[in-house]
Image (cartoon, grey):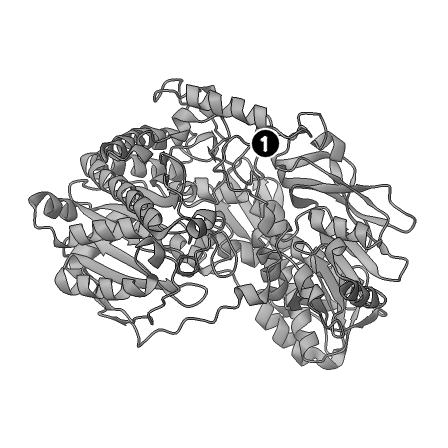
Amino acid sequence: MRRTLLAVLLAVAAAVAAPANGSAQPSSTDREPGNGPERNEVATLDSALGALSVQARGENRADRSQGYPRRTTLRTYPENPADKAIKLGLAPYHSLAPKLNALQQRSNRVSVEVVGQSGLGRDLYLVTLTAPESPAETRVQERFRATIEEGRSVPAGLYKAPIWINNNIHGDEWEGTDGALRVIEHLATSNDRETQDLLRRSRIYFNLTANPDGRVAGTRANAAGFDLNRDFVTSSQPENRVMQDIVERTQPLMMLDQHGYVANTLIEPTTPPHGQNYDFDLYIKHGYEGGLLMEKAVQALGHPEAAKPEIPFRDYPVGEWDGWAPIYTAQYSMYHGAISYTIEIPMRVNRADYDALPAAELQRRSKINTDVVEATIETTLDYVDDNRRSLIAGQTEMFRRGAAGEAQRYIPDGFVPGFGPEDRFRTEFPRAYVITGDRSAPAAARLVDQLVRHDVRVERAEKPFTLGGKRYPAGSYVVDMHQPKRGLANVMLEQGSDISGKAPVMYDISGWSHRLLWGASVDVHRSGRLHFDGEPVTAAAPTGDVGVAPGADLALTLTDPRDVSAVNDLLSRGIELRRHDDGTVVVPAAERAAAKEAADRYGVRFTAAKPGGVALQRKTVAAAVSADELQVLRESGFDVRTISTAVLNAGFDWSRIDVLYVGSGLNHAQLNAAAKAGLDAFLQRGGVVTRGATGSRFNTDAKLLQATPVAGWEDANGVVNVVNGTGPVGTGALPHSFVYSPQWFTDLGAGVAVEQRYGSTVLAAGHWRARDNGTGGQDAAAGQAAVVSGTAANGAKVVLFGTEPMFRDHPKGLYAQVARAIFWTGTR
């Protein structure tokens, strides 16, 4: 790929501005940190998340039409003068339902469906623009869509080209919604022949606001504190699950994800590294051509502020705006057959600018932004209409290659202008993956359900079978990689790659393997004859079991978050349990009925217990944590009280707290005298678990364990190989973990045990380079202590994590480590 003068200047500017410590830094000032203040410096508090669920007036009334239009009389929401969109002259959320109700009355081209609710209960609207269809005509279109997914041709002249426009996924990037409303109204009401013909040939879907809670509050994240444009293969948030359903259901030929703000406007395609599981030849031809046309349309608006749009593929250095991870809307949608784009509109109106600039200036900027949104949407509609046959053929070919098990195509230099060796990423797809419950039946079931909800095809073996010389029992799950969406299946199940040498920096995470991090036993079969009797899976089979004769104590080993939830459920009922240091929890024989209920509810499996163990009570955790950690702890069933430096300084009741968890937003040095006294008193009886730089700094300042934290490269991230110890946290843990801004511990004091070390080969998948001065790299971390435990001089049990076991609610197989740490440190 050519590095234009702009790209060279960006790189030079970054080098000049590099910090004195020699750390490698990205060059773009628009780059959002992957592991920034929201995960390390700012504690998530219930008072910040605790906005009450929004109460709507009335109920939504859908007309139940099986054709189009599909009208819904939408319930409305009370007027909210605090809606942040109002200051910008944009549509507040409460105005959307009345607008859409009116449009549905005016036009038979408009359909509105409520496809879900946000975290706070606001409706999510899917607006469809198309010429009216009878139910029979709609069934024909659905058969065409299904036929294309099987990799078979359909009559292109009869298939309505689907296009998806996603808006406002970041709540404080508002104008996608308003630009979409302009286009919706035009398509709904215009009587010109061009519009009518377009709608006869197309279905245009608008997710009007993907993040209404963030829109109202003026926050990037949703109400739970999650960045929705990082959650697509994790599916932790309701808004993301809705978007996944939309892209699967509509199977768009092209999609736009409207964002802000990058000076002059940014229009994908991305820089390399490109995801290695794409059939990239089928994407980049249309992806680049469509991007160039959107660039011209934005320039034609005549706004000086948008005169020179940037196309990362053409204009940015390698890694500056990569397309590697499937966590983003656009990159995820490509696995469903879409030619997809992230669009970044130009004029910043959020955060400091929102507060500092006068309303008139903000509204001027927002109008320019809305013009840009409208131009990119209209250009996309025209492009799809002009190239519909080629786009349909390309999507069909992608699915056909997957079903046939064909190799990805070699893409020669110059395939599109600027395509070069640095753009060439391919993989060899295995023949199959086999998922079993050998390590954890609940983990296997969760992974299978996750694959199925993403439209990956999974079969359950009805009889024992042999593959690759290994015998598998009936009930094993098989992912045959000869399937239409094999790229999506593989990007979730493969190990991934160490791409540290492919790019100096990456935009966000570079490793995420569900196979290595979600706790299930998954075998990879690279080749071989695949022959077994199986049935397609729509949901994993139940896994709960009490496999012990009545009258015997029952054991549950904490290997999965569902095991932890089951234990916390039993504890919340007042049942007296016992705990062994190997992670096993014992339920007395007299509580067999309660254990059976837990097995059925959580899918966990009880086995015969060994004697002994110490009494285990339910733990209450005071947590200075990020939003993702808070969600994991609560989903695991812990009683969590959110804290921060300010909360402790204001006075905090420690009387019911068993464990202090420190990951973000607690600085011991900033505590006042009364707060320190209260904390010191707690540490005489309670335990401490820490994560990351904030946690290790707290450990040092509070003089708990003797352990010197060493920081790896700040941007290093991915799946790491680890070697587990035999202590209360390391026993039975996975041989892999996850890191972002990794740490390790040296100069360990007497009695400080290593629960987990980095392997001799550190990175299994991801991006981890050394700083320019040679420090912080993988070689320095190899063999070092990643997780340690010990008892402080004041008697407090302490566990320090240098890894990221709860990052963005993704690495499910690591959560039991955290629970074991909490149960161990909270028991004296």
Which x, y percent locates residue 91? 30, 58
Q: Residue at x 71, y 65 (%)?
A: 648
Which x, y percent locates residue 280? 40, 31
Which of the 4 image quarters holds residue 314?
top left
Q: Residue at x 37, y 30 (%)?
A: 310
Q: Indicate left or right for 626 with 128 as reference.
A: right
Residue 439 in sight in this render:
no
Seen in the picture, residue 3 relative to 752 is either above or below; the reply is above
Which quadrant, please, contains the N terminus? top left
Q: Residue at x 26, y 30 (%)?
A: 296
Which quadrant, please, contains the C terminus? bottom right
Q: Residue at x 16, y 50 (%)?
A: 186
Q: Nearer the viewer, residue 203 or 515?
A: 203
Secondary structure of the residue carrying numbered label 1? loop
Q: Which amino acid type is shown beneath numbered disc 1?
A: Gln
Residue behind mark 1 = 25
Q: Nearer the viewer, residue 199 or 26?
A: 26
Q: Indicate left or right for 440 with 456 as reference.
A: right
